[in-house]
Amino acid sequence: MPAPRTILLTGAAGGLGTLMREALPAYGYALRLFDVRPIEDGDGGEDAGEGGGGRNIVTADLADKEALREAVRGVDAVVHLAGISLEAPFEKILRANIEGTYNLYEAVREEGVRRVVFASSNHAVGFTPRPATTPAEPGALIPVNTARRPDTYYGLSKGFGEDLASLYWDLHGIETVSIRIGSCFPEPTSVRMLSVWMSPADGARLLHAALTAEGVGHTVVYGSSANTRLWWDLSTARALGYEPQDDSEPYAPALIAAQGELDPANPDHAHLGGHFCTNPPIWPY
Ligand code: NAI
Ligand code: 15L
């Protein structure tokens, strides 16, 4: 497979999309941006218009099949971040995350794109009991083939996306890396995040590995930095060539002083998905 150069980044107006449209051009990618929310010209992230160089921002909903088809036309790969990123009523999740991801894969199939990187989530397996690891006693890590245990309709939709990716590989030969992202933010802001944090720089490293590794078929990986308090197995991500450089541990003393250590008796702390299992944050729109 020739190295992908022109990438459609869906969800480009969001938190992760903004971080990645700043980080990915350094890897040589030209980006085409897609989101239902407008992205201001000059907001960051160089763009791949016709022949490169021109701005090429698509403001459209994942429900708009024509817009999606036009958006994927001519790109080498898609990084699919768009969708509802928190819990929401099932009808909204159905439209944006389930039908929207299906529409995206249909556009990819129709336009002959060969590679997708799908933003799955740790919440596809959120009700998995969290390992009782400490820096002193690292426990057994959660493997990627652990049974799905979604903690929300949101997590359920991510399991659907992973299975859709598997189907489109087996039926149509479209390759996908599904990344069960932990928490990709500039800094970890909770004790749980010390285990699941992915620095934005490691996020870009992982996307680059997922875009360029040969023969991925459909591969599921966890997305995090090489955290001292890691809960899951990063070996499938490392097999793509991902070499995380960051660790949340420097943030641990201040977060633990402010919030205390995780308490196994606290239901918010019992599972991988944390408070999504008990009181999930609701999508505000
Ligand atoms: P976000 O909520 O900041 O961004 C999502 C973007 O998708 C928004 O800009 C929104 O306008 C767009 N969008 C939503 N519905 C759409 C639709 N129907 N059509 C077109 N665009 C639509 O979320 P964030 O944090 O940037 O996450 C990006 C992706 O990564 C999401 O799929 C999320 O589920 C996934 N993820 C993110 C994690 C993180 O730590 N940031 C952790 C795990 C998964
Ligand atoms: C997610 O899937 C969410 O999209 C993100 O906003 C974070 O809440 C993250 O999981 C997390 O588990 O911290």
Image: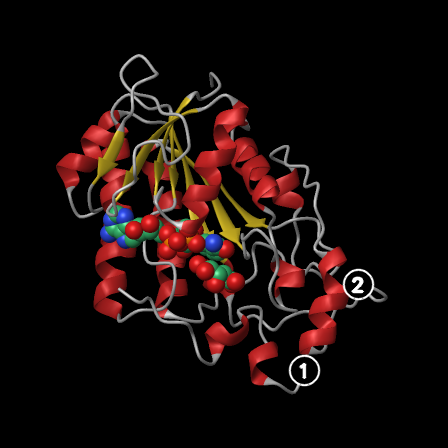
Q: Image check: 140 left or right of 90? A: right
- Residue 24, percent from left and from top: 49, 31
Residue neighbourhood size for the residue with mark 1, other residues' Cα within 10 Å, grouped as few (<14), some (14–19), many (≥20): few
Q: Is residue 5 visible?
A: yes
Q: Amino acid at mark 1?
A: Pro
Quadrant of the snapshot with the C terminus: bottom left
- Residue 198, percent from left and from top: 60, 50
53 in relation to 279, above or below: above
Q: To which residue does mark 1 refer? A: 264
Residue sticking out furthest to the right:
136
Q: Image check: 27 left or right of 99? A: right
Residue neighbourhood size for the residue with mark 2, other residues' Cα within 10 Å, grouped as few (<14), some (14–19), many (≥20): some
- Residue 115, percent from left and from top: 40, 31
Secondary structure beneath dot 2 equals loop
Secondary structure beneath dot 1 equals loop
**Quadrant of residue 31 in the image?**
top left
Q: CA distance from mark 2 to mark 1?
A: 16 Å
268 in relation to 113, above or below: below
- Residue 68, percent from left and from top: 21, 36
Q: To which residue does mark 2 refer? A: 138
Q: Tell which of 135 and 150 is nearer to you.
A: 135
Q: Amino acid at mark 2?
A: Pro
Q: Is tag 2's residue or tag 1's residue first in the polypeptide sequence?
A: 2
Residue drawn at (33%, 66%), measured in percent from left and top? 283
**Residue 128 tag number:** none
Labels 2 and 1 touching (C-beta < 8 A) = no
Residue drawn at (13%, 35%), measured in percent from left and top? 66
Q: Is the C-beta of the residue carrying label 1 under 8 Å from the nearest atom of ligand 2?
A: no
The number of discs equals 2
163 in relation to 107, above or below: below
Residue drawn at (56%, 32%), measured in percent from left and top? 209
Q: Is residue 217 visible?
A: no
